[in-house]
Image: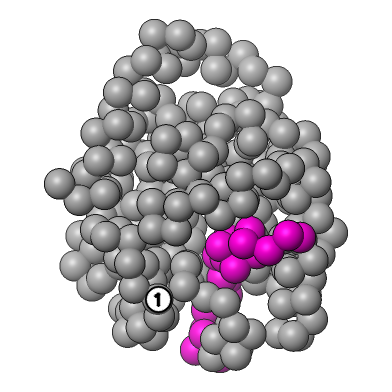
Amino acid sequence: MTILDQIIENKKIEIARAKEKVTIEELTNSVYFNKKTISLKSSLLADNSSGIISEFKRKSPSKGEINMGAGIAETTMGYTKAGAAGISILTDAVFFGGFKEDLLIARESNPSTPLLRKDFMIDEYQIYEAKAWGADVILLIAANLETDEIETLSKKAHELGLEVLLEVHNQEEINKSPMQNVDIVGVNNRNLKNFAENNVNASIELFNLIPNDKVQISESCISKPDTVKQLRKMGYKGFLMGENFMKTSNPAKALEELVELIK
């Protein structure tokens, strides 16, 4: 069983328990559910955009503990101030050390910054959660979803006013994925089977296979300013980066320094 398989099996248990505690009706009555969505797509396409989607991530299956002591409000507010085009918040507890409270706090602390709920979405219930917790965008991972699941989940996200970031790793995943309700396509450079590898070859190889009416971003394994410049020259509009910032004592400062170097 791969790490991804383990994550999905655990996610099924988490969702079943969540449904027993909080109904969809209760989620729709939350303070953020009817909030107007802030467009990550528009933020990435803006003329003065840094293109950086900064991630708040305490740990990962590949790296273990990264920064368990980082404060969610302080870090995300720092990201916004440093010029993040958007902020990605991990809400998986077991494998990534994230919680729904992280998203709620980030939303309260950053009222005008697009927020991505980064999790392993396999059930429409999670989309209602994302909306209720203040997210603007959800992540769908093609590697763990069938074609009909991508279609159903992306359609539900749009019905609820959320944008959709579809993550792919290879040509097969691009070919199988219905794109009509997808706003952003992200190429994850990390192999989710083992969470290894450390290059951007996938982004280079897959760029021309992604429909050009979608905003294209590169995810993971990005640390050097020259890499961002290289991918931007190809046509990538966004770069999802987490570990590179979170492994430092001051993630927001690390972002600020990168933004200066890629101007």
Could you say where residue 81 lies in the image, as x and y percent from the top left?
Answer: 84, 59
Q: Is residue 51 left or right of residue 260?
A: left
Residue 7 in view of the camera: yes
Is residue 236 magenta-colored? Answer: yes
Is residue 109 magenta-colored? Answer: no
Q: Secondary structure at mark 1?
A: loop
Q: Is residue 147 left or right of residue 47?
A: left
Furthest residue in direction left, as rendered:
1
Q: Quadrant of residue 26?
A: top right
Residue at point 73% right, 68% down? 255
In the rendered structure, which segment of residues is drawn in magenta? 231-250
- Please say if 180 is above or below 238: above
In the picture of the structure, the residue carrying the numbered disc 1 is 198
Residue at point 63% right, 59% down? 246
Could you say where residue 184 lies in the image, as x and y percent from the top left?
Answer: 48, 61
Q: Quadrant of residue 253?
A: bottom right
Image quarter where the C terminus lies is: bottom right
The colour scheme used to paint the residues is: one colour
User: Which residue is more in the foreground, 145 or 198?
Assistant: 198
Q: Is residue 57 left or right of residue 107?
A: left
User: Which residue is more in the foreground, 80 or 62?
Assistant: 62
Could you say where residue 194 lies in the image, as x and y percent from the top left?
Answer: 27, 60
Could you say where residue 192 lies in the image, as x and y percent from the top left?
Answer: 30, 59
Which amino acid type is marked by label 1? Asn
Furthest residue in direction right, as rendered:
81
Residue at point 40% right, 80% down? 199
- Please say if 46 is above or below 164: below
How many residues crowd around disc 1 within 10 Å: few (fewer than 14), some, or many (20 or more)? Answer: few
- Please say if 132 is above or below 255: above
Residue 41 in view of the camera: no
